[in-house]
Image (cartoon, rainbow, N blue to C red):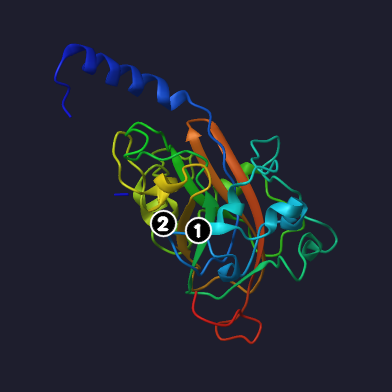
């Protein structure tokens, strides 16, 4: 996905759309935390890691045509209270995962991709240019947390800033750059009023199934990220001040470690 009105009534109609659509209801969640498949249609066997307790989706985890199972609603759209949709398990954070739906293992300096269902939220030829997408960021904990960070703690650690691509991404900081390309997941922010396939709306085949189409965004693990356990938070604001969050765990291992997933991210 990468008019001028002819009559006054058309101009009025476009103005009404521009006013009303940003207040529409939106929801989504992360479906894969290490996706290495087709960017047009979700490939289940190319998803090497998942969010917490992905097995609690029961039958909604079975692969169906075009990977549309990721968009089946099972209550994963979290808006709070709390920064995480499902809490870290203690004393062992690994208890939120199993052999079928493992946690992510990342290597420093490598690029990895996240995947999500679009849930009808993209500016496209089959919708209109005014579908909002306020912000999409990936935030991470410090190494080896004993519990999930608060939202304020997450906000201090934007993955792009840690990787050296951005500065001042904390939304609470004076002069914050959170809403600029450099702080956004994938280093591109959607621009309202444009059909640009950026930010949350990065979905080339959106119009084939606006509800369950695949969206993706990629990030680089900082080259100096210490080995250990981290909590990631996918943070998407459809309407401003109305975010959706998915938390997931990942382990950073030394580059070339035998613990790393095989293949190229």
Q: Position of residue 118 (x, y in %)?
A: 50, 45
SS at mark 2 in the image: helix
Marks 1 and 2, Cα distance to the nearest angstrom?
10 Å
The residue drawn where x is 75% and y is 56% is: 53
Relative to 181, say whether 21 is above or below. above
Relative to 92, say whether 173 is above or below. above
Residue at the front extreme? 65
Q: Nearer the viewer, mark 1 or mark 2?
A: 2
The residue drawn where x is 63% and y is 48% is: 246
Question: Is residue 5 found left or right of 105 in the rendered image?
Answer: left
- Crowding around mark 2 (Cα neighbors within 10 Å: few <14, some 14 to 19, many 20+) is many
Q: Nearer the viewer, residue 39 or 65?
A: 65
Residue 30 visible in the picture: no
Q: Which quarter of the picture shows residue 27?
A: top right
Mark 1 touches mark 2? (CB < 8 Å): no
Q: Which residue is mark 2?
A: 186
The label on residue 159 is 1
Q: Which quarter of the picture shows residue 225?
A: bottom right
Question: Is residue 66 found left or right of 143 in the rendered image?
Answer: left
Q: Position of residue 130 (x, y in %)?
A: 35, 31
Q: Earlier in the sequence, mark 1 or mark 2?
A: 1
SS at mark 1 in the image: helix
Q: Nearer the viewer, residue 72 or 110?
A: 72
Relative to 87, say whether 43 is above or below. below
């Amino acid at each position: 996905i990468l008019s001028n009105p002819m009559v006054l009534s058309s101009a009025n109609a476009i103005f009404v759309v521009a006013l009303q659509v940003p207040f529409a209801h939106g929801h989504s969640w992360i479906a894969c935390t290490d996706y290495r498949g087709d960017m047009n249609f979700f490939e289940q066997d190319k998803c090497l890691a998942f969010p917490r307790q992905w097995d609690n989706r029961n039958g909604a985890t079975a692969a169906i045509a075009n990977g549309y199972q990721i968009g089946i609603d099972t209550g994963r759209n979290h808006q709070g209270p709390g920064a995480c949709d499902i809490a870290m398990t203690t004393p062992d954070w690994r208890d939120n995962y199993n052999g079928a739906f493992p946690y992510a293992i990342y290597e420093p300096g490598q690029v990895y991709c996240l995947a999500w269902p679009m849930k009808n939220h993209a500016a496209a030829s089959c919708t209109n240019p005014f579908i909002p997408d306020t912000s999409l960021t990936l935030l991470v904990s410090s190494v080896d947390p004993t519990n999930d960070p608060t939202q304020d703690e997450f906000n201090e650690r934007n993955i792009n800033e840690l990787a050296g691509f951005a500065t001042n991404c904390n939304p609470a900081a004076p002069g914050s750059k959170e809403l600029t390309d450099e702080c956004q997941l994938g280093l591109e922010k959607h621009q309202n009023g444009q059909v640009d396939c950026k930010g949350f709306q990065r979905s080339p085949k959106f119009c084939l199934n606006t509800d369950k189409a695949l969206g993706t965004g990629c990030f680089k693990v900082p080259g100096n990220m210490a080995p250990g356990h981290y909590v990631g938070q996918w943070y998407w604001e459809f309407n401003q001040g109305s975010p959706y969050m998915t938390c997931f765990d990942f382990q950073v291992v030394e580059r070339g470690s035998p613990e790393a997933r095989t293949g190229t991210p």
